Image (cartoon, rainbow, N blue to C red):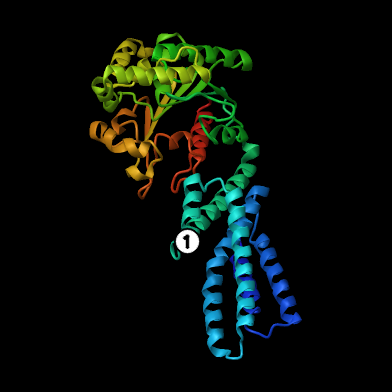
Amino acid sequence: MFKQRPVIKIFDGIFITAACLSTFLYEFSYFFIALTVVLTILAFVFPGLYASGIAGGRLKTCSYGTTILSVFPYTLLVVVPAFIVSLFFNEDLGWPAIITYAVVTIVLLNLFFWTGIIIVYLTSKQIGISKRLLGIFCGMIPVANLFVLSWIVKISGREVKDESERYWRNEARIPDQICKTKYPILMVHGVFFRDSEHLNYWGRVPAELIKNGATIFYGGQESAGNVPTCALQIKKAIVKVIEATGAEKVNIIAHSKGGLDSRYCITMLGMAPYVASLTTVNTPHRGCEFAEYLMNKAPEKLKNTVAAAYNRGAKALGDTNPDFISAVTDLTKDGVARLNSEMAPMQSQFDGIYTQSFGSKLNHATSGKFPLNMSYHFVKHFDGFNDGLVGEESFQWGSEYHFLTNKGLRGISHADMIDLNRENIDGFDIREFYINVVHGLKERGL
């Protein structure tokens, strides 16, 4: 189990601080050269003892760099004043000695700092590109660099702690196989994305589910197409899963437009006998008014230009017949109302199928990643509180509904619900969320 050892940081700080002080508080001699070398070696060795139970070489290395960085500011607070004081109280100290001591100290501090920052930059997955660039930009700005440094230390330290605890939690529950459902899981993506081997739409979620016993397949429908077209492709995916596994049914977990595609597949394409459950995540079951506004107000030339550009790109990436306009139209309030009206007479198809839905919201626009931080207020104007794309009132569907949020400014965005940014969010664990969803299906015998 992961266990922090703060005393290691204390000793590490003492060692690097003493190494720096030994270079200018005493007469320059072979003894103090040796002492400086020994203390420096100890300062670089001790961070490796910072914690036990860290899972994996990457996290151990990240922990090493994080410990060095967390000690560095406190070293400065002692070394710099001590150096200044020594100049006043040691009148016999000549300029050659002062320069020598200063150079050695600066070299030691830089060696200590850059070792930590390079290691953390290379090993942390939670310090994104923007934070790395901010760290570089603020590196030469006094005071600001210390604030950014503390931010980086906090992020990387939490990553080591959270990921190590996750590893041991998964190890402890391996015998239970809590996500080993009776029927395989079919994960259905939303609009403008494709399932990819190298850039999985669901981020770190599938791997986490598999570790806990789940059998995972993907819908693989068009990234942009009307609901009936995508529903037909999901039907083909269900058939393939059943043929590959010998299972009688599948459990569908669908995000965003994928929920509409899946509902249409079950009600209109005769797949109800082959579906055990349908879980929709942030699906616009009542459409998006802001999308309707854009479709009605945008000039035809602009819409056609954007659609043509998207369709060309989507086709190059694997879509067989991408249709940007149809995909967006089916997400408007009128578009979804039309689909709901079409599916309404067939709702009895869901008899015997367990249905549930989830929704979430951003608490503040700036907490969302681009472009959801840009769209939040626009969507709010038309649809009220939202996840950056879909209004809160549009999420609810099925026999059970759960609305997710967390404290503070952060909130949970449309993209967070599929781990698009691979970000560990305070107050919300996206991987554990899906584990609980699938474990719930298992508990129901599905």
Give how far across and how far down residue 416 sits, in percent. Answer: 44, 37
In the rendered structure, the answer to whether residue 384 lies left or right of residue 371 reads left
Give how far across and how far down residue 382 sits, in percent. Answer: 24, 31
Kindly identify the residue that appears in the image at 61 percent across and 86 percent down.
Answer: 94
In the rendered structure, the answer to whether residue 38 lies left or right of residue 446 reads right
Residue 323 picture quarter? top left
Q: Is residue 41 visible?
A: yes
SS type, badge 1? helix
Kindly identify the residue that appears in the image at 53 percent across and 67 percent down.
Answer: 73
In the rendered structure, the answer to whether residue 217 lies left or right of residue 381 reads right
Kindly identify the residue that appears in the image at 70 percent across and 75 percent down.
Answer: 36
Residue 131 higher or lower than 340, as above or below: below
Give how far across and how far down residue 19 sits, in percent. Answer: 65, 74
Residue 52 higher or lower than 72, as above or below: above
Amino acid type at circle 1 is Asn
Residue 27 higher or lower than 188, as above or below: below
Give how far across and how far down residue 222 sits, in percent. Answer: 47, 17
Q: Count up the numbered dots.
A: 1
Q: Is residue 329 visible?
A: no
Q: Which residue is mark 1?
A: 145
Q: Residue furthest front?
A: 96
Q: How many neighbours does mark 1 have within 10 angstroms: few (below 14), some (14-19), or many (20 or more)?
A: some
Residue 51 picture quarter? bottom right
Judge by depth and name the residue closer to the eye, 91 or 394.
Answer: 91
